Structure formats: C-alpha cells, structure tokens
Image (cartoon, rainbow, N blue to C red):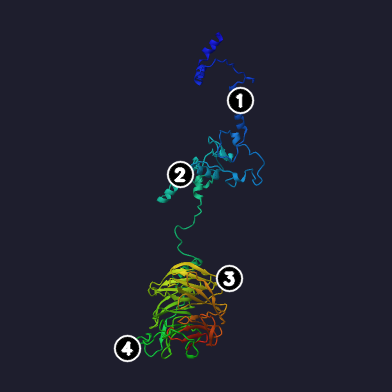
Amino acid sequence: MDLLQAYKADDGDDQQMSDHSSPDSSPPRLSIAAKSAAPKVNDTMLSLTVAEAIANKSLTKPLDPTQHVVAFNPTYDQLWAPIQGPAHPYAKDGIAQGMRNHKLGFVENASIEPFVFDEQYNTFYKYGYAADPSASAGYNYVGDLDALKQNDAISVYNIPQHEQKKRKLEKKKEALEKDGGDGEEVDTSEVENPATDAWLLKNRKSPWAGKKDGLQDELSEEQKKYAEEYAKKKGEERDGSKDKGEAVSDKSTFHGKEEKDYQGRSWIAPPKDAKATNDHCYIPKRLVHTWSGHTKGVSAIRFFPKHGHLLLSAGMDNKVKIWDVYNSGKCMRTYMGHSKVVRDISFCNDGTKFLTAGYDKNIKYWDTETGQVISTFSTGKIPYVVKLNPDDDKQNILLAGMSDKKIVQWDMNTGQVTQEYDQHLGAVNTITFVDNNRRFVTSSDDKSLRVWEFGIPVVIKYISEPHMHSMPAISLHPNGNWLAAQSLDNQILIYGTRERFQLNKKKRFAGHIVAGYACQVNFSPDGRFVMSGDGEGKCWFWDWKSCKVFRTLKCHNGVCIGAAWHPLEQSKVATCGWDGLIKYWD
C-alpha cells in the first residue's frame, strides 16, 4: 500500500492527464520503466567527433575550379592545389579552355591606382624590377634583383640625388640662354671630363638638333612638283570643270526666211489649223519626203510635242538640226555646241527648249527659237540618256543616265546636283516615267530593269532574269499601262506599269534583227501598232493585239536607228538611219 501511495504522490500529473482523457474513473495501473539493450553513448563526444571529421574532410577536399560560391573558408593549400584528374588534352599548361580568360591562362581583376601602376610599369621598363602587386606588405619585388640592390629600390618617380643635381644645372643653363647672359664660368677640366655633368651638358645632342624651328621656307624641286600635281588634282575634283566636258563655243545658224512672220509669230509657233485626227491610225505605205543635211549618221529624232510641225534630229556630225514638217520641209536651224557625237535629245513639254547629250560629256539646255545655250551640265562622264520630268511644275528637273552607272538629277534653276540614283551595275541606257510621273524605269547594260520612286534613290522594283538581255530602248504605251522594251535578243518585250511590273508573256514582238543596235521602239498614237527600226535598214510594224507583223518598209541603207509616229497625223511616220537621212512616210 505504501508503494501505491508513493506512486500516486509522484505521478500526480499523469493522474490528472488520465482523468482528463477519460472522465470515468478507472482502476490505477502500474507502469514499469523501459530498458534499452544498446550500450550507453556520450552524445557530446559523438557530436565533437562528427564535426571534426567534417572539418578534416573539407580541409583535405580540393576546390572545384568551376564553382562560383564556396560555403566554407578554404585554406591556401586548397585554393592553390593542382586540379585533380587527367590533364586537359588541348591545354598546354593544364588549364582547361573554359577556365581561361586570357591567352596565357586565367587573369584576375585587381584594384590598383593608376599612378601606382604607371610607377611600377615604368620602373620595370627602365630599371628591370618592380614591386610585386600580389605581395601583402609590398616589400617583395620581381625582376632584376641585382639592379634593385644597386639602385636602392628606387622607382622612376624617386629621382636619385645626382639626377636632381643634373636637372638643376640643365634648368639653370636654359634660363641663362633665354636671358642672353654668359652664365657662370664652368671649369674647363670638368668640361673635358666625360664623367662630369658639365661634359654631358655640353655634348648632349637632341634628336632635333640642327633642324630649323618653324616651317621650312623653300621646297625642293621634287616637293614643288608633287605639290603642284596634288593641287591640280584637288582642284579638278572640287570644281570638275577641267575634265567634265570639252569646252566648245556654242553657235547656232538660222536657215529660214525670217524668224518672225508678218503677224509677229515665232517660227516655232504651231500652225493654228493643226488638229488631232489620229482617232484611227494607219500603217504608212510610201515615202513622201527626205531630209538630208547631216554629213554623218543620224542617232535620234524627236517630233515637236503635241503638234509635230517641227522635227528635231541629233547627228553624228556633232550637230543638232530642226526641220520643218508641214510647209517647206527644209532645215530651219542648226545647233552647234558639241565637239563629239550627239547621243540623245529631249524636248521640254512646250517644245520651247530642248536638251542634248553628247559624247563630249556635256549636257546642254537650248532655247529652240533663238539657238542660245541656257545652261550646260556635266559630271565628267558620258551621258547616254537625258530626260526632263514630264510634270509641268517640275520642268526644271533634269535626269541623265551616265556611263558610270549612275542616274544624276539636276535642278536646272540652281545648276546643282540634287540626287544620285546609284544602283545599276552598268551604263544607264534609258529613263522612262510611269505612274503619273511618280516613278521611273531605267534600263542598263547590266541586263536589268530598275524601278525608282522619283526623288528617292532606292530601288522599289528590281527586274533581272538569267534569260534577259540588255534593253537599250524603251517606250511607254499611250494608255500608260505598258512598257515596250527593245531586247537585244531580237524581240520586243512588254512589261506592265502597275505595282508588280510583270512581264506580259502573251505579248512578244519578233522578226526583226536588232542585236547590237539601240533601235528605237515606238507606238502609234492610238496604241494599235508597235513599230521599230532594225539593223538592216527596215522599219517593222506589228499589230498590238495579235502581235503579228503588219508591214515592213525598207527605209535606209544601213541601220534604221530611230522611228517616230507623228503626234497628230494619222499615218505619218519619220525614220532616221546611219546613212545620214531622215525620211517621212505616209
């Protein structure tokens, strides 16, 4: 009973717990303490042993060179232990390629003041030793230790005593020379002794000794010759006037009876009775007139815009002539301003002025009536084609396709080049405005067509196929939807002028021989017929719808280079050839 009472007194808390857990009273139970069969172990000693083992393991374990974070404080031996494992096959010094950040190995960033670095850098290159930046206290040196002892470890910024003395003497001497004084008397024995500072001062020689101060007054003959050539070259590049075009005196001769009639009208004024009757065009059959006046071949012909009462021709005799079409049929005026063959001509919209381009590298803007040259343009390259912007408000804008692959745009009011379209890979042959004159198409010797937005020197459409040939003549259909391009593989190709500029494969005009010649292609004013000259002197006419040959006329001996349909007459056509003749057909 005594034992039970003691148990009850000791375990009162347990009793309360049991009372809470079960409200109904239960008979008291006797609990016996559990015994473990394992031997007793001291927990403190165990924890110390484990910690020591972990520490020893971490001390002996080498660091992984690729890890970026170390979770404990490694020792010096661990940091600089050699990398375990086989040597890297492509690393000579055992450092793997991924470990390198320099061709000699791994370089760590160090924070060193620029002055300290410069001091040690210059000291090393002058004396051969420098302080070791990796040394903690800064007393360790690398390099030539013998020189270090000899110079008492001075740097370039710590000047030794004898050097200071030498510099003082130099400054003093310079000051005396500046003042013009004789200075202190120097001992002659010191001057003659090479070991003294006085001897050094007297015999020192600067790399610039003996050279004159300031600029050289006179140039040698060779230098003068070079300077003249250089100045000449620069001057030509700047103004370009010397190489740009051959200067020729501009002359013009009037061949008519009088420049103004009894009513005071100019000879270039169109006749009042000239009315458009070209609702339905017909193919010409017979020769009605021949104009002969050019002593060499004729390269191009253009009718006077809208009326066609005058015909302008460019000749290989360096002359441009204008002929009467309606009345006398004679030459009205000759324009002489080129020293070489005239390549292209172009009227302005109202016909009062026109452009000529010659192989003398000049482009000239003429007054049709008076024969005066209004302005001359040149880039020093041969212009192959000249065109004015067809818009009435842009008649001062000149475009020229040049032999140096560029299309150059001038403002004729100022005479300045305002734009250069430079994308072609060969000389530019034609310029044709399309899409209400907002765009223009150019062809070149590089066998491609390029479409440009006017004023923007970026190609918006590039047409080039392996089977394409060069297209030296292009004409726009009267409805503005098609381009006829004279291809040098003896055919005329048709391209649409809409957004895509696609080749119309259904329309192809062939039969003539034009390979090697830039024979002009043209349309009848009603768009029903296509015509072209050829290399054998014939003029070919095709039907636009059926693409069949309608008629051929034997026009010239030699090449028939140009053909133009009269703008008003229904069936009148002018042709020109290399035989020097211009013929009018009806």
Q: 584 or 125: nearer the eye?
A: 584
The amino acid beneath tag 1 is Thr
Q: In the rendering, which numbered label is found on residue 530?
A: none
Q: In the rendering, which numbered label is found on residue 263?
A: 4
Query: Which residue is identified by label 3?
Result: 466
| Mark nearer the N terminus (4 vs 1) | 1
Quadrant position of residue 397: bottom left
Q: Residue 101 at x, y = what percent?
A: 57, 46
Q: Are marks 3 and 1 in contact (CB under 8 Å)?
A: no
Rate crowding at label 2 as few (under 14), some (14 to 19) or many (20 or more) other CA atoms within 10 Å.
few
Q: Are marks 3 and 4 in contact (CB under 8 Å)?
A: no
Disc 3 is placed on an element classified as loop
In the picture provided, is 261 more to the left or to the right than 194?
A: left
Q: Residue 132 at x, y = what percent?
A: 55, 39
Residue depth check, mark 3 versus mark 4: number of the one nearer the observer: 3
Q: Residue 83 at x, y = what percent?
A: 63, 39
Determine the CA span between mark 3 and mark 1.
Answer: 87 Å
In the picture provided, is 411 more to the left or to the right than 9?
A: left
Query: Which residue is identified by label 2?
Result: 168
Q: Residue furthest front?
A: 24
Query: Which residue is identified by label 1?
Result: 49
